[in-house]
Image (spheres, coloured by chain):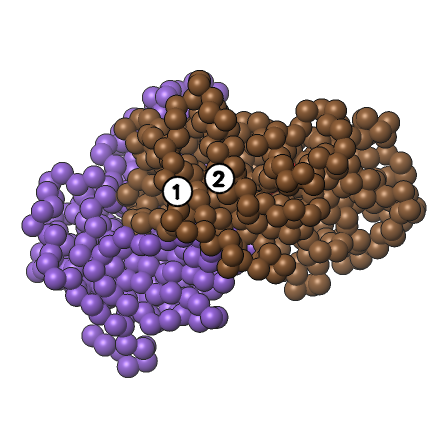
Chain colours: A brown, B purple
């Protein structure tokens, strides 16, 4: 598995495994971590020795910049076990490129792509017993970068830590989700950091999402911050709308995360001959379609949930229910994606990367 | 100094002081910390025992939410030593209320105001030898709250840490600053978290600020994200414009931090009979005033820099220089503020709080 073009990753193995202590039938999402983690520090202008070591706590200054200025980015990806016990990643190159794009926007030095790929492969291989078999089960992989320079002046850090931690997970959402269309709060601005997986984008959504929850909804569908007129994306998912038999999703922009699942769905839709439109969709159009009985489906797409069907949306205090479709696109794409991820089907686009 | 209405703060004193190791003539801004810090954990739905203890590192899970979701807020304030050796805070109640306002927007539980005030007083008193005498010298005080729950699901934390750390500082900026007016990037959106001192707001500015630096400027003056038409604030300062003898500053909104220095300058201007206008100012108006020779001054206001005169601004690649004024408002307000902060003048508004 070693690749001669990348520098060797130093590996320190854990003495014992925590695997036997984990109840795989009752996993809280992303709260149990595997035996090992990957760590690489940036200092003196360069990335130091990449290291796999036992999962454990960090010792951090209370003045570390990440704690004060949110100079941090992350990724979310998964490893899947097939029926032969082989483990696969899904389009990892996409996440590798995206974390570096996020880093650039956050003034964080980019991490060498080949080392990241190699780290992912070695780390997953080492902890592969943590990837549980069974459709829906997976190993959630969280690469992230934090700024570690000590000091409370609001300027970019000169020290960083790139890490990968991993947590076994079951399916993320159980059941359909009910969403609220944002009318007052916003997720990101033109010229802001919405297109980056920057830490602060997520904390900023918790309060408005809590307000939605208090009203009996699960998530917010964000609209543009200027006019709250165009539908953008959800907290950790891109969003698709099926009006009659046309599948519509917002174009990516500097406000919207360019989701790996989103682009995979677009490919699968194309392959299936489904009419797709990547364009701005107004809330008015959505409401009109719902009223006319033309809105067949809404679903979210994201690594954590794969495909999340939306059963109702609320706008200006009116709740619009969405009936289940027999020929659900959400179900189709979820199956198509999972068939590829779990090595049940062919892999026509070469999305799987076997560990 | 103990106040019977507040619970006792547990105090663990440091064995030795690092004071003698510090070169107070060569302080990097906010990079040396005093002997003690304040810490209070939130768990099981409540704030636990407030504690002052020796300054030191934190042990943190790599999956702590603050590192992934930027659910964190902070404050910046200062303690000043007067010629009698007495130490004063400046309008601390403002910062206490503001951090809780920030917390609310970031779905963080608010911290009891009285405990925060008591913690500030006791902590500064304990480390008062770190407050160096001399105008411009001060002790920078950084209260902050971080989310500490272990887990990589994007939802609010159930555990937090409220801390106060302190660093001796000299004046923040040396000399005048040259600024760029934002035309492409933005700091915050309507309905976003710009009015909160949320960690992620700061990291998000580093990249565009770096671009400004590469062009020979120090800071960006942010404009509204919708049209880049209205002047808003700088990275860590509110901004004032003097056109002829009228002082103009943007109104606060959910995009702009409600600065303590800003509101103090407005009070001082009122007292001095200076005509002030709190209103939206367009970039066009600013450029026209500069061309007509009516733009007399631009200055920033903030705790770190107090008042920062701006010597030039750039817009659409044209640089507009601003000549020094004999009757500079910037100089006047800086002197007025520092006279109050260093107990040189009366304190007509009761802004000083003696430790
Ligand atoms: C804001 C946001 N949108 C969309 C997505 C979906 O992206 P992906 O399909 O790459 O997981 C995510 C995250 O994972 C996200 O955080
Ligand atoms: C974004 C921003 N604007 C303005 C200010 C000035 O506020 P204050 O005068 O309270 O320090 C600060 C910070 O301190 C800030 O972070």
Quadrant hosting residue A23? bottom right
Where does residue A117 sit, x and y in percent of width and height? 51, 28
Mark 1 nearby-residue class (10 Å; few <14, some 14–19, many ≥20): some
Describe residue A211's horizontal placement relative to residue B277 as left or right.
Answer: right
Please give left or right for residue A152 compared with residue A211 in the image: left
Compared with residue A70, is residue B217 higher up or lower down, i.e. above or below?
Answer: above
Residue A197 seen by the camera = yes
Q: Nearer the viewer, residue B332 or B114?
A: B114
Contact between labelled residues 1 and 2, with CB atoms less than 8 Å apart: yes
Compare residues B192 and B93 and report the one nearer the observer.
B192
The one nearer the camera, A193 or B75, is A193
- The residue located at (76%, 54%) in the rendering is A176
> Residue A352: x and y, percent?
65, 30
Label 2: chain? A
Mark sitting on residue A13: 1
Can you tell which mark lies on residue A126? Answer: 2
What kind of element bears circle 1?
A: loop
Other-residue count near label 2 (Cα within 10 Å), few / some / many at <14 / 14–19 / ≥20: some
Q: Provide the secondary structure element on which disc 2 rests.
A: helix
Which quadrant: the C terminus of chain A?
Answer: top right
Instruction: Find residue A199 and report its horizontal and vertical position in percent.
Output: 49, 43
When asked about the image quadrant of residue A346, the answer is top right
């Amino acid at each position: 598995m070693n690749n001669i073009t990348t520098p060797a990753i130093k590996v320190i193995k854990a003495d014992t495994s925590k695997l036997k202590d984990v109840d795989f039938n009752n996993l809280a999402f992303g709260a149990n971590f595997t035996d090992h983690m990957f760590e690489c520090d940036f200092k003196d202008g360069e990335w130091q020795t990449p290291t796999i070591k036992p999962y454990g706590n960090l010792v951090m200054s209370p003045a570390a910049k990440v704690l004060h200025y949110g100079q941090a980015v992350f990724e979310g990806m998964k490893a899947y076990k097939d029926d032969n016990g082989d483990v696969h990643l899904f389009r990892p190159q996409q996440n590798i490129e995206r974390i570096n794009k996020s880093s650039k926007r956050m003034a964080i030095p980019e991490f060498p792509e080949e080392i990241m790929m190699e780290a992912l492969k070695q780390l997953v291989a080492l902890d592969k017993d943590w990837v549980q078999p069974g459709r829906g089960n997976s190993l959630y992989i969280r690469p992230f970068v934090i700024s570690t320079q000590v000091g409370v002046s609001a300027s970019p850090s000169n020290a960083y830590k790139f890490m990968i931690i991993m947590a076994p997970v079951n399916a993320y959402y159980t059941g359909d989700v009910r969403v609220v269309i944002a009318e007052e709060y916003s997720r990101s601005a033109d010229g802001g950091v919405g297109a980056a997986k920057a830490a602060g984008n997520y904390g900023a959504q918790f309060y408005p999402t809590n307000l939605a929850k208090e009203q009996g909804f699960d998530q917010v569908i964000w609209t543009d911050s200027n006019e709250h007129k165009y539908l953008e994306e959800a907290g950790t998912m891109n969003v698709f709308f099926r009006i009659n038999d046309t599948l519509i999703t917002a174009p990516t922009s500097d406000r919207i995360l360019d989701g790996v699942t989103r682009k995979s769905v677009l490919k699968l839709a194309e392959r299936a001959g489904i009419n797709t439109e990547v364009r701005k969709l107004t809330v008015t159009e959505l409401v009109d379609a719902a009223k006319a009985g033309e809105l067949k489906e809404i679903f979210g797409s994201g690594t954590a949930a794969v495909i999340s069907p939306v059963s109702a949306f609320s706008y200006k205090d009116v709740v619009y229910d969405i009936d289940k479709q027999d020929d659900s696109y959400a179900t189709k794409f979820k199956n198509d994606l999972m068939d590829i991820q779990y090595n049940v089907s062919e892999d026509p686009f070469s999305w799987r990367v076997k560990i």
